[in-house]
């Protein structure tokens, strides 16, 4: 007797088994449904079953077998409601084993082709989609087909192809040790030993998974917090800044031409002068003179507050640029460059003499005869970032570019023709003469008119002779005020405007911005003579020769 009262069967059935409660294979009819409740079919005719040994049909009256209830007590079989009338047939008595199962060969499924009695249709209790298959004896049972693996997805949950133990509760094996065996499935009872054997490993993996999850979420939270703080600081917080006027460590900073506030701030931050670009931009905007910061070389300190850096850059004390003064001749500029680059004296002059064609002169500034220095007039007066380590040709190229940009922005080619000149080259020469002869900026426009009036073919005062001491000093490389008349008239050099009509072959210096503008816009008051009556800064102008003689006497009487 087994625990379910089915007799001494080798495989007791569980109540959850769909075959539990069946009456057996001897032609008996199951009396109880699943769960132990009887089933009634009052209007459904019950069909008789034949012999399994021959496949013939027999009523319950032909042969009966003892039937047992679920507690092993024998009871009388029920009589069929209707008896099918058939002629008795001879058949072989089936043989049964000790468990009540027929032995020998088995015919085909007796349920397959049963005629419905009384012309009605027999209900197929096993044909519903959700019904279980009809029971079979142990000898004919087939292994349950393996389930096809579920189609894979793009997400790979891991080597177990399922939920991780951390999320699926894989550690609950130990917690179920006290649970009764009858509450577990048959699969657990059969393979429980193997599963429990891997409990520790699953616990270890669950702990590692916990650490990984904590690390991932913790790192993500830290990243979100950091970037959130940065976003808040950028939008609403004050920019990082140093305090004080520096740590005492000096640094040389070069600000490129055309740099705005952000560009300057980036250079200063890179050199360690300020702590942030935004702090410098804010300090520059707060200073009324902040926009006056120019390109060039500055000597600053590291770790300065943005406000102190702005103040120092506006002070002449910080400027370390090479300053080219207005009217400076090229010979003097070359010496300044040599000194700043700390190279041998004469290095820059030699580069200018041998490589002048490669330094960026415009086409209209080349191939002029008798020119002493092709770069004269093109080393534009300004402030240049020049420091040791640079090459002379790079410095010269920077200056030529600045002058070319200035002349082209003022449309020299067009303006030269309107002023009666042959081209922009002559306009640069006029500007250099204005710069050299004018003592003050107020004199420049009058001096420009003197030049244009003396160049006119209708000039009957000097007959196209400029008669400028500055041109003679240029060819001599001097700057004398008192020049002997005999010396001047004996020198026939093309740059001597006492003996040669018209303009000199080229510029005699580097004109500044005011002299250039004056050359483009002379006065129209009829000035043709001038004298520096004090010999230094005061220049007086005359329209006639007699007025000129009076001014000359004034000069000699000083």
Image: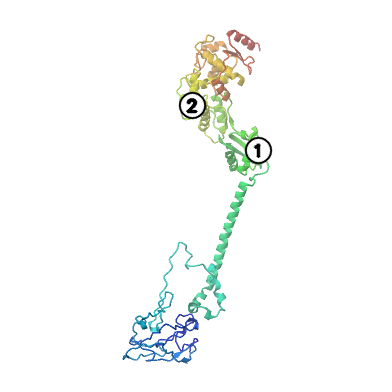
CA distance for labels 2 and 1: 48 Å
Residue at 44% from the left image edge and 75% from the top image edge: 130
Disc assigned to residue 286? 1
Screen quadrant of the C terminus = top right
Asked if 6 appears above or below 459 in the picture, the reply is below
Q: Secondary structure at mark 2?
A: helix
Residue that protrudes farthest toward the top in the picture: 546
The answer to whether mark 2 and mark 1 are in CB contact below 8 A is no
Report the front residue among 187 and 221: 187
Residue 304 lies, in percent from the top left, at: 65, 41
Decide: few, some or many residues near mark 1? Use Cα within 10 Å; few <14, some 14-19, many ≥20: few
- On the image, numbered disc 2 is attached to which residue? 353
Residue at 49% from the left image edge and 83% from the top image edge: 36
Residue 162 lies, in percent from the top left, at: 48, 67
Residue that protrudes farthest toward the right in the picture: 244
Residue 256 lies, in percent from the top left, at: 56, 36
Q: Is residue 71 left or right of residue 437?
A: left
Disc assigned to residue 29? none
Residue at 47% from the left image edge and 63% from the top image edge: 156
Q: Secondary structure at mark 1?
A: helix
Q: Is residue 99 left or right of residue 172?
A: left
Asked if 203 appears above or below 275 in the picture, the reply is below
Looking at the rendering, which quadrant does residue 113 occupy?
bottom left
Instruction: Kindly tell me whether residue 31 is visible in this rendering.
Output: yes
Instruction: Kindly tell me whether residue 372 is visible in this rendering.
Output: no
Report the front residue among 521 and 199: 521
């Amino acid at each position: 007797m087994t625990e379910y009262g089915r007799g001494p069967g080798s495989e007791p059935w569980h109540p959850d088994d769909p075959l539990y409660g069946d009456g057996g294979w001897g032609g008996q009819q199951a009396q109880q449904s699943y769960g132990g409740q009887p089933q009634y079919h009052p209007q459904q005719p019950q069909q008789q079953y034949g012999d399994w040994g021959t496949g013939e049909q027999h009523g319950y009256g032909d042969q009966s077998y003892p039937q047992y209830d679920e507690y092993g007590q024998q009871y009388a079989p029920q009589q069929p409601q209707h008896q099918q009338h058939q002629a008795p047939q001879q058949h072989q008595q089936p043989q049964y084993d000790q468990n009540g199962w027929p032995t020998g060969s088995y015919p085909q499924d007796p349920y397959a082709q049963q005629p419905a009695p009384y012309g009605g249709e027999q209900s197929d209790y096993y044909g519903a989609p959700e019904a279980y298959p009809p029971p079979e004896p142990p000898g004919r049972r087939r292994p349950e087909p393996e389930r096809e693996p579920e189609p894979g997805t793009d997400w790979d949950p891991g080597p177990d192809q399922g939920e991780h133990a951390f999320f699926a509760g894989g550690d609950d094996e130990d917690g179920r040790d006290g649970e009764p065996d009858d509450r577990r499935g048959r699969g657990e009872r059969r393979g429980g030993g193997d599963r429990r054997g891997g409990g520790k490993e699953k616990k270890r993996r669950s702990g590692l998974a916990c650490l990984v999850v904590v690390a991932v979420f913790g790192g993500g939270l830290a990243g979100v917090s950091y970037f959130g703080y940065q976003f808040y600081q950028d939008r609403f917080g004050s920019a990082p800044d140093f305090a004080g006027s520096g740590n005492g460590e000096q640094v040389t900073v070069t600000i490129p031409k055309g740099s705005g506030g952000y560009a300057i701030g980036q250079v200063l931050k890179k050199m360690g002068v300020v702590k942030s670009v935004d702090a410098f931009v804010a300090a520059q905007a707060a200073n009324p003179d902040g926009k006056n910061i120019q390109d060039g070389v500055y000597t600053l300190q590291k770790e300065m507050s943005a406000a102190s850096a702005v103040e120092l850059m506006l002070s002449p004390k910080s400027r370390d640029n090479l300053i080219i003064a207005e009217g400076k001749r090229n010979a003097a500029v070359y010496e300044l460059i040599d000194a700043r680059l700390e190279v041998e004296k004469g290095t820059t002059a030699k580069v200018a003499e041998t490589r002048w064609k490669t330094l960026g002169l415009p086409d209209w500034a080349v191939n002029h005869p008798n020119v002493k220095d092709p770069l004269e007039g093109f080393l534009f007066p300004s402030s240049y970032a020049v420091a040791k380590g640079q090459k002379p040709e790079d410095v010269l190229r920077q200056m030529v570019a600045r002058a070319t940009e200035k002349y082209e922005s003022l449309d020299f080619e067009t303006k030269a023709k309107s002023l009666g000149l042959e081209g922009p080259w002559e306009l640069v020469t006029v500007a250099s003469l204005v710069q050299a002869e004018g003592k003050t900026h107020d004199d420049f426009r009058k001096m420009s008119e003197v030049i244009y009036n003396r160049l006119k073919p209708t000039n009957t005062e000097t007959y196209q002779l400029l008669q400028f001491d500055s041109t003679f000093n240029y060819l001599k490389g001097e700057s004398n005020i008192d020049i002997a008349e005999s010396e001047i008239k004996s020198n026939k050099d093309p740059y001597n405007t006492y003996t040669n009509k018209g303009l000199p072959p080229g510029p005699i210096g580097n004109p500044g911005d005011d002299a250039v503008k004056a050359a483009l816009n002379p006065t129209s008051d009829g000035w043709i003579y001038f004298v520096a009556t004090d010999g230094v800064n005061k220049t007086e102008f005359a329209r006639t020769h007699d007025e000129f003689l009076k001014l000359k006497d004034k000069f000699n009487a000083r």
